[in-house]
Image: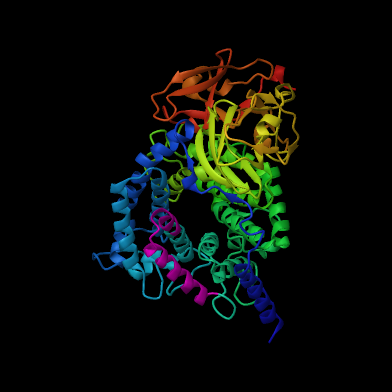
Amino acid sequence: MNKKTISLLLIVLAFSCLACQENEKAFDYTSLPLRNVTFEKGFWSQYAGQNAKVTVPYCIERCTKSGCLHNFQLAAGQISGDYLSDNTWLDSDMYKALEAAFYSMMKYPNEKLLQETDSIVDTIIKAQEKDGYLYTARTTHATHPRVMKFMGEERWTNMGHFSHELYNMGHMIEAAIAHYELTGNNRFLNVAIKAADLIVTTFGEGKLSYPPGHQEIELALIKLYKLTNNPSYLEMAYYFLEARGKYSERPPYTDEFFKEYHQDHLPVSKQREAVGHAVRAVYMYAAMADIVTLTNNEKYKLALDSIWSDVMEKKIYITSGIGNQQLGEAFGLPYHLDNLHAYTETCAAIGLVYWAERMFAFDQDSKYYDVIERATYNGILSGISQDGTHFYYKNPLESKGNKKRTEWNSCACCPPNLARYVASMGSRVYGVKGDRLYVNMYAENQADMEVNGANVHLLQETDYPWEGDVRLRINLDKKQTFSLCLRIPGWCLNQPLPGTLYRVYEQDKTNERPNVWVNGEEIDYQIEKGYIRINRKWAKGDVIRLELFMQPQRIASHSAVLQNENCAALTYGPFVYCAEEIDNVTDWDKLELSLSEPFSCHSITTGFSIVPKMPVLSQNDELKLIPYFLWANRDTCKMKVWIPVRKECNN
């Protein structure tokens, strides 16, 4: 037995042991299940409600019209015809739309939608081949030249480029898990398990050794492992990660571009910078973070900490958008953060959240939620219109007036991804670890959880994200001692984002520390990793009040970001603001921001279903700015986030 085989057996044994015993690190920190959090009014009630009523059904409808359903019906033998599409990843659009629907129906039951999605699931079940393979382009013998080129002549022969076989199946597995969580029925889950078992028997030591071209299957397999406790799925995810950057048993790419594009240039444990296709990258980093949490893999943690720092210090926009360059939809060079040509795909911002959530699960540092919050309210929500049926694939920080949201994209990965993100928003608000209850995001909601053996019902009352006053009312079945951990957002500690890439101008730094009261009595506190930890014996009726001071803050970027030289951006709480030409009738090219004049706030009536009154920050009626996520909802016009600073006011 050679050393490589012995090493692999040791890895398998280690993972098997994880599944056979109660591992304190695995699942130690847990987010609240989606069912346990209810948005009854406020910002997220509006968004989640419209998502359920409008966006999710719209995504299902568009996936049907685009050819997704046709292709599944064709593969299932229900109809005759040809594969519809010029790409190989169309299956995944339907899977994401289904996942969004299943999550949405957990809080917004919809019998008509349930019947429609169940019918689609029936077709998917019939489309799966006997051995578990599920990939409609090949099953239907697609003849489109581009599809034939991308999928390769045989199964798994073009994975390193654009077959997307494992990517599609990964999203199928996630959709099947969501279906099981909604219905308790395992008929779709059985499809996922059958596909996962095929993957396990096909890839690995002595079998096929190529890693997936587009990361996603790793996240799905880890989710399936958590649900089924089958260690082979965790082992497979780990193998796919470990296969990157190793060419001893497979040829390298003929085109050097694709090594970094697929994050396949180095073994993952040796990677230190964010490179290549941004969505692929953050999905991979998220899977690596899962492995860190489940196995305490120190090499992965070292790599992830370095990559995180690289992104935060050099490669992230103030909106938490990532992936600045169009070539390869990729991370570019450090500090090359062009605003007009920022690619900043919506899916990349969503993937960044998935990565940050998993980093947080390991060590509960609020800096990760600072990124989640900034991305959510800016780089993600900007990707969907206020009517819920128009979308941005790219989210630039400047526009010449030629950027209009579309009803659908030819590459439609973002709309259903947005729908599933909004549908699952409730799972991001709270988390529990032992005797600690973490309040990670502030939003009007009710939630139920178990903390240190007590059943806790929590009512959160707030107008956040528009205002910073939060009240938490506790109802529990018995008095119990535990720690309530309140996140203090970085923005109210003069930290726009983690790192030194962005800073608050000196005159806009707040000196006001957040105030905290328990049952009307103000308490003193320390902030640890961005949280105020209140440890006490809680009783029914206890009320906690948190006051976060919001004020307009002008932001400067690192001097190495030449694009933003002598410019400032404006933030207010979690929101980044922007100027639109429709509100600024003076010469657009002479628009300036003063560093000395204060901002006043007023609102304008919009007619938007979610934000009927839009807050506007202005300086002497010469400069008016609106929340960035609302741009291009009233008209298609010029826009910019970074505003030139008046020379006489520059400091």
- In front: 223, or 168? 223
Question: How was the colour assigned to the protein in this rendering?
Answer: rainbow
* Residue 28 visible from this viewpoint: yes
Q: Quadrant of the N terminus?
A: bottom right
Residue drawn at x 59%, y 53% is 282
**Residue 309, image x and y in percent?**
71, 48
- In front: 546, or 424? 546
* Residue 143 visible from this viewpoint: no
**Residue 504, image x and y in percent?**
70, 29
Q: Quadrant of the C terminus?
A: top right
Reply yes or no: does residue 196 show up in magenta.
Answer: yes
**Residue 262, image x and y in percent?**
58, 60
Q: Quadrant of residue 559?
A: top right
454 horizontally vs 50: left or right: right
- In front: 153, or 285? 285
Residue drawn at x 52%, y 46% is 427
Identify whether 642 is placed above or below 248.
above
